[in-house]
Amino acid sequence: MTENEDQNLEAAQNVVNDYGHLLAQLDGTCYAHPISRLPRTKEEIKNAIQLLLWELQGEDDTICGSLAQSYVYLAQFVEDDEAEIVSRGQAVLQSSDLDPDELDYADKAAPIINRIKLEMESLMSDIKAFIP
């Protein structure tokens, strides 16, 4: 491996580590997260995960699976205002005391959640190219 390749691999590991630390801190019950919380752009994180998967070439199924899952989770990072709508919409639907003024958030959250699901499916298809 050349020095440049080593540097690229180390940079990718740093990006993925930063992203992994963020994922560990998130509330797993929330379906959307503010994109402003990402340590790097979605594209930088995608590229870093792809590089690591390419390097691993299926050597460690556990790590490859975690990387693939993290890749797909990127879909849950949406514009901050959309993340707020989804959060409030989820809260309304999970509340035992429905506030009619908040019901509008549930309606607004549905198309955002559907878009996230479609993007997750797309990312899953993309990442399969990097997993043997």
Image: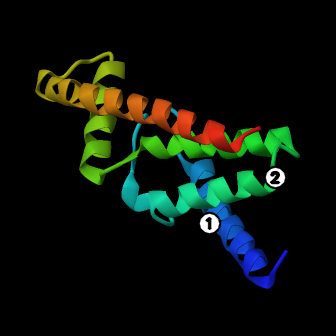
Q: Residue at x 72, y 40 (%)?
A: 131
Would you name the residue on which mark 1 appears?
15
Query: Where 23 sits versus 124, above or below?
Result: below
Residue ID at (30%, 51%) = 79
Give the image quarter of residue 6. Answer: bottom right
Q: Is residue 47 left or right of residue 90?
A: right
Q: In the picture shown, does residue 114 fall above or below 84?
A: above
At 11% from the left and 27% from the top, the residue drawn is: 101
Residue 30 image-quadrant placement:
top left
Residue 104 position by quadrant: top left
Residue pointed to by mark 2: 56
**Mark 2 crowd level (few <14, some 14–19, many ≥20, 10 Å Cα):** some
Residue 87's x, y, as percent? 33, 37
Q: Residues within 10 Å of mark 1 (few under 14, many from 20)?
A: many
Q: Which mark is first along the chain, 1 or 2?
A: 1
Name the quarter where the C terminus is drawn: top right
Q: Could you tell me how many numbered marks the image carries?
A: 2
Mark 2 to mark 1 CA distance (whole Å) = 16 Å
Look at the numbered disc 2 and give the secondary structure of its residue.
Answer: helix
Name which residue type carries label 2: Leu
State the scheme by which the image is colored.
rainbow
Label 1 is placed on what type of residue? Answer: Val
- Residue extending farthest to the left is 101
Q: Would you say residue 30 is visible in this rendering?
A: no
Q: Secondary structure at mark 1?
A: helix
Residue 57 spot, x, y in % from top left = 81, 48
